[in-house]
Amino acid sequence: MKEFAERIARELELKVRAVENVLRLIGDDCSVAFIARYRKEATDCMNEVMIARVKKRSEELSLLEARRQTIIESIDKQGFLTDKLKSDIKNAKTLSELEDLYLPFKPKRKTRAEIAKQKGLQPLADLIMKEADCDIDKRAKELVSLSKQVGSVQEALEGARDIVAANINENASIRSAMREYFRRYATICATEIKKDKNKTAFYAAETSFQSDKTAFCKNETPSYKNEYALSAPSHRILAYFREEKAGNIRLSIKPSDDEKAENFLLYRCIRRKKSGSCSFQKELAARNCYKRLLEPSLQNELRNELKDKADKVAVEIFAENLRQLLLSPPLGEKRVLAIDPGFRTGCKCVCLDAQGKLLYHNLIYLSQSEKAKEQLHTWAKQFNIQAIAIGNGTASKETLKLVKETVFDTKPIISMVNEDGASVYSASDIAIEELGDYDITIRGAVSIGRRMQDPLAELIKIDPKSIGVGQYQHDVNQSLLEESLNNQVISCVNSVGVELNTASPKLLSYVSGIGPSLAKNIVEYRNTHGAFRSRKELLKVKRFGAKAFEQAAGFLRVKASDNPLDTTAVHPERYPLVEQMARDAHCSVKELIENKEARNKVKIERYVSKDCGLPTLDDIMQELANPGRESRTMFSEQEYDNSIDTIEELYVNQWLYGRVSNITAFGAFIDLGVHTDGLLHISNISEDFVSDVGEVLQLGQRVRVRVSEVDYVKKRISLSMLPETLDKSKSNKSKTKK
């Protein structure tokens, strides 16, 4: 562990002691959320992201060590393990270095080199490898006369060159040098595969997400594109691979000048300056090695590296989008009338109580507006409705208009709600378990209403890939995506905290230390024994032991508890400390929470101990000052620009308001309320250079944008936040550069 800790600390620029403590706590089955929140002194106040990186890197190094041991054992069994080779293997820092060292000893299929060795051509190959000062044709002729397996001098030389090519390919130092050459000079070349004369086969990345189908962008060359591989943006890398998989392009990722690459290889492996027959044969073997062995192998390695990097960027963007969506402002415990709009089949309406329980459901029809208004008024009065949630799908604007024209006894909050994924929830096992007695359309309306009350509690029931945020989520490494999104959900749930007596099994399962099995046991206990009266009562739940309590208790809230600390994020292990503070301030814990003057009497420096330092004490005091504080921002009504309803009403240079519906590496998509999101390219966000869209825009943010281009037939909208004059200026500069 110490060796790992030192390396990780060096790579991530952290203190070795802090990394050692993180690895120890992870080894003790502590969750990332728990370590970040309640073990700050041990980790030098690392946040969740950094702790997760330490954990991930530790896992990678463990896999590397396991592979190292396997390689040593394999070579040792073959009888080729020397002290120097063993030392080289132990000193290898990366998996690529390890595999290069193992390549000569790796069990092989029947290669051309192996066949040549079986024909007895190894001695001839040795002469070529040494660049011996001899007539190699004469030596080959001698070998032909002695061997019945070799039919001619040409065959002998070809076989010997195959062996030499294999030796060059398996040389660790040569492979390492060529790998760096590829990484430095490799370019991406995408060649169109013409399937239909009337249809463009190559499409660019920037607009591919808009309809989840790739689309030709006028700024891209349709038949090919050459750019340095390592500098290509992640979204374009993913677009290339998507088009290759679809059979639209032929993709190569290698240095564009084969001659220079071969000469670089010759410089690494030809020793003699003077030409000779052996040197000439070795040069032929080296060139063959590049084309047949090194280039395909290194190209494949680089493709994998580019794909991995692009996947990580896409997954990070998706995870950040998901976090912003999950932490969207909640309305809170208010009675909601939720409407899933529709023209032909009517608008599905449901009334929910403050905890999201379905009280009533019915239909209204937009074509019968007066009757619909009467129905809405009646239901709002009957169920004391405090807010109205309207799904943002088809007929949403018409429904919003109808609701706003309705006269209510009390003025409810009226807001649009993103309904992406509601249909997925409606058909899920969770929906059947919760609302199995109701039609699938009613379940969707309930989901819309609950999203308004608490987006986090409702959205975690849906596969994140169905929520409508992200970039190329179906093209990236699915296990990496699943892990990242799951970690993000866990982080969000634990940062907000969970009310123990109302949380669903799904929500409880994401709490640190719980999981699906214990979540089910908690709900069963709650259903059998009634509401929990304290956090301590959790220990009575089946299989809920001391370790689970340690990990979970601080993230659970019990509003009904007699202990006021059970409603805060103060961990039960610190209750004695807070009680001591109260005694020293001559008051009760409740008074300490409610009375600022009592808290001002507490000098936290007095309570510093070996395992409880100022960071933890500061957290405790903040929690006492704001018990159960909500980390999410305040709820605000969401609506669209009422001046337009369809894409046909848009025109170039029109300014209007929209809502950021998705963020990608190349820009943001803006929901304008016309059922087609517009693309706000990263270059059109600000006059200043923007490297990261997420640093400027947030999901759900209301922005004022200008329509810069509209394709009414293909349903594509290009947007800008820049004045028209600046756009023209940028365009002219671009033309000048060209």
Image (cartoon, rainbow, N blue to C red):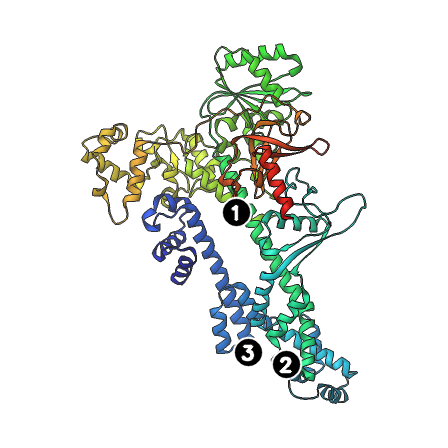
Question: What is the CA distance from the residue labelled 3 to the residue labelled 1?
Answer: 41 Å
| 639 on left or right of 611 | right
Amino acid residing under circle 3: Gly
Instruction: Pinpoint residue 556: horizontal percent, then vertical percent.
Output: 39, 36
Q: Could you say whether the residue bearing mark 1 is in a helix, strand or loop?
A: helix
Residues at marks 3 and 1 touching, judged by CB atoms closer than 8 Å: no
| 49 on left or right of 308 | left
Q: Mark 2 points at which residue?
A: 129
- Nearer to the camera, 463 or 12: 12
Q: From the viewer's perspective, is the residue at label 2 or at label 1 nearer?
A: 2
- Dot 3 or dot 1: first in sequence order is 3
- Nearer to the camera, 37 or 631: 631
Query: Residue 455 shows which numbered tag?
Result: none
Amino acid residing under circle 1: Glu
- Nearer to the camera, 511 or 468: 468
Q: Mark 3 points at which residue?
A: 79
Amino acid residing under circle 2: Met
Quadrant position of residue 600: top left
Residue at 29% across, 40% down: 618
